[in-house]
Image: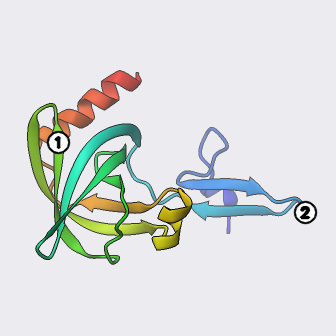
Amino acid sequence: MDISKVIDESGEMPGKRAKVWSDGRLNMRLEQRVHERYSSRLEARFFYGNRVYTGKVTDISEGGVFINSEINFPRDYVFDIILLLNKKVVKMSAKVSRRVGNGTTAILGKKMGMGVQLLAPSEEYRQLIDVFKTASC
């Protein structure tokens, strides 16, 4: 493989993160995130069957959110999520893309929750992301 075709002008490998191990070997892994992430503290409500759960959105991007909660839905599960945005309620469909932790994680006080992909972000959600982008500049 010709590495010069993979490395961009800055000498970086686009879409990859590199770590040099203690023995000098280079470990590359594909960066899965497509959109820039922003920290948030939004309230979320989500549904599993006929039950309603709550959580905090601690990480937000154009394509999805991380919900810090005591419940993890199965990977690829599609569900409705409601975000509470400045006295507005924004409802969207989401799909679980990543799960973090388990029941004992919550007991030990470590981070637990799920990363979800928003299947059809609403206009209100897009406007919220624009606010985060502006604030981070």
Q: Given the image, on which type of amino acid does mark 1 rest? A: Leu
Residue at horizontal 63 percent and vertical 51 percent from the top: 7
Residue at horizontal 32 percent and vertical 47 percent from the top: 57
Above or below for 79 versus 90: below
Above or below for 136 versus 33: above
Looking at the image, tell me whether mark 1 or mark 2 is earlier in sequence order: 2
Q: Position of residue 112 (x, y in %)?
A: 45, 61
Q: Residues within 10 Å of mark 1 (few under 14, many from 20)?
A: some
The quarter of the displayed image where residue 133 is located: top left
Nearer to us: label 1 or label 2: 1
Circle 1 residue: 84
65 or 26: nearer the viewer: 65
Above or below for 59 versus 103: above
The quarter of the displayed image where residue 71 is located: bottom left
Q: Residue furthest right?
A: 23
Circle 2 residue: 23
Please indicate whether residue 23 sits to the left or right of residue 61 in the image: right
Please indicate whether residue 30 sits to the left or right of residue 94 in the image: right
Q: Measure the alpha-carbon separation of dots 1 and 2.
A: 48 Å
50 or 57: nearer the viewer: 50
Q: Position of residue 17 (x, y in %)?
A: 62, 54
Q: Given the image, on which type of amino acid does mark 2 rest? A: Asp
129 or 79: nearer the viewer: 79
Please indicate whether residue 8 sits to the left or right of residue 125 in the image: right
Please indicate whether residue 95 sits to the left or right of residue 110 in the image: left
Residue at horizontal 31 percent and vertical 61 percent from the top: 116
